[in-house]
Image (tube, rainbow, N blue to C red):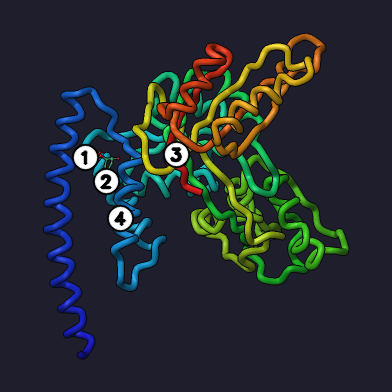
Amino acid sequence: MDLSELRQRIDALDDQLLLLLNERMEHVKAVGEVKRAQKAIIYRPEREKQILDRLTRQNNGLLSRSAIEAIFLEIFAVSRNLELPERIAYLGPEGSFTHQAAESRFGGMSEYLVLPTIHSIFDSVETGRARFGVVPIENNQEGMVGETVDLLREKELHIAAEAYLSIHFAFASQFDSLTQIRRIYSKDIAFRQCSKFLREYFEDNRIELIPVESTSKAAKLAFNEPDSAAICSHIAARLYGVPVLFDNIGDSDQNRTRFLIISKNFTNQKSQADKTTIIANLPNTHKPGVLFDFLKDFYDRGINLTKIESRPLRQGSSFRYWFLVEFEGHYEDEAIREILAKYGNNLKVLGSYVRTA
Ligand SMILES: C=C(O[C@@H]1C=C(C(=O)O)C=C[C@H]1O)C(=O)O
């Protein structure tokens, strides 16, 4: 088959795809109307996961799981926009890893609100300026993001979903000769995570490492100051037009960050694989066995704990703690309901949502 014949076939398939997509949108619109009549929630991550799992199972073509995800997550995002336009706040500036995570869930068509701090994202969701907020919660090399964890306890918001993103750092500069570079901008955490690369290429210490608020701000600075460079995301380098000289310069190629999608008054129905996040304000944590007894309740019921993080209570000068606890299952599961009932107001459920890793 020659090129023009192949392209004709592609055109014919695209015509069919367009018809099918529009047909799909008709049904989506009808779903939107049913939901509006029932005052139901538009975004259903567990339903989207079900669709992705089913398509992956029956797929026997060239598309990989991540290709199917990329295409269909975009279709879901367009669908949700048709049901009800959603505004999504994320931790900016544009080009940040949080931006990348937000787009991976809400696609290129949603309306985004770019905010400078994690606190302002919680505020925007609380006041209704944004329907969803995307914030980092933990990185598998650096641990938890304390500000997010503390705000989860402080505010009355829920976790609608989680999203994982592989973090790949790029080295971008307008100069292609490293000896001309005088300064490197990045986030402090990124300098730490790219220490091997920095040692290898800049060990004579002539270079200044300047921490800034975000990796995308670093890219912007590297664009404005040609004798500097940025350690940033690929998307930020592209956004600000700074050529990437080295890619994947991180110490670990397993570097991943987990993000949370937060919302107000949001509940998910049960799916096949859920995770639940709670805040535990246990009384008398200074007494022996309090935490042990609490954890034993999970052990006794065969509930798999996936995280426990202690945070300071900040009560006077004492060293007392509260805990962020995560475990497999949904808050409607019998065993989990028993624990929630036992501890009453000492536990606050932030949400049960589809487990994605
Ligand atoms: C159409 C629906 O609403 C949204 C869009 C979906 C889709 O495009 O398939 C799936 C789940 C929801 O996030 C639905 O709930 O079925």
The answer to whether residue 90 shows anywhere in this view is no
Q: Amino acid at mark 2?
A: Val
Q: Is residue 12 left or right of residue 56?
A: left
Whether ligand 1 has any atom under 8 Å from the Cβ at mark 1 is answered as: no
Q: Which residue is mark 4?
A: 54
Look at 50% across and 59% down and name the residue there: 238
Q: Which of the two labelled residues, at mark 1 and mark 3, occupies the earlier sequence position?
A: 1
Q: Amino acid at mark 4?
A: Arg
Q: Are marks 1 and 2 in contact (CB under 8 Å)?
A: yes
Image location of residue 255, percent across then percent down: 63, 54
Q: Amino acid at mark 3?
A: Asp
Query: Which secondary structure, mark 2?
Result: helix
Q: Is residue 115 above or below residue 253?
A: above
Ligand 1, image quadrant it occupies? top left
Question: Considering depth in this image, is 50 or 208 the residue closer to the camera?
Answer: 50
Image location of residue 290, percent across then percent down: 71, 19
> Cα distance, mark 2 to mark 4?
20 Å
Badge number at residue 274: 3
Q: Residues within 10 Å of mark 1 (few under 14, many from 20)?
A: some
Q: Which residue is mark 1?
A: 82
Image location of residue 88, percent across then percent down: 40, 35
> Cα distance, mark 2 to mark 3?
25 Å
Query: Which secondary structure, mark 1?
Result: helix
Query: Which secondary structure, mark 3?
Result: strand
Q: Which of the two labelled residues, at mark 2 and mark 3, occupies the earlier sequence position?
A: 2
Residue reaching furthest to the top: 316
Mark 2 or mark 3, which is nearer to you? 3
Question: Considering depth in this image, is 55 or 316 the residue closer to the camera?
Answer: 55
Q: Is residue 226 above or below residue 5?
A: above
Question: Considering depth in this image, is 337 or 357 the residue closer to the camera?
Answer: 337
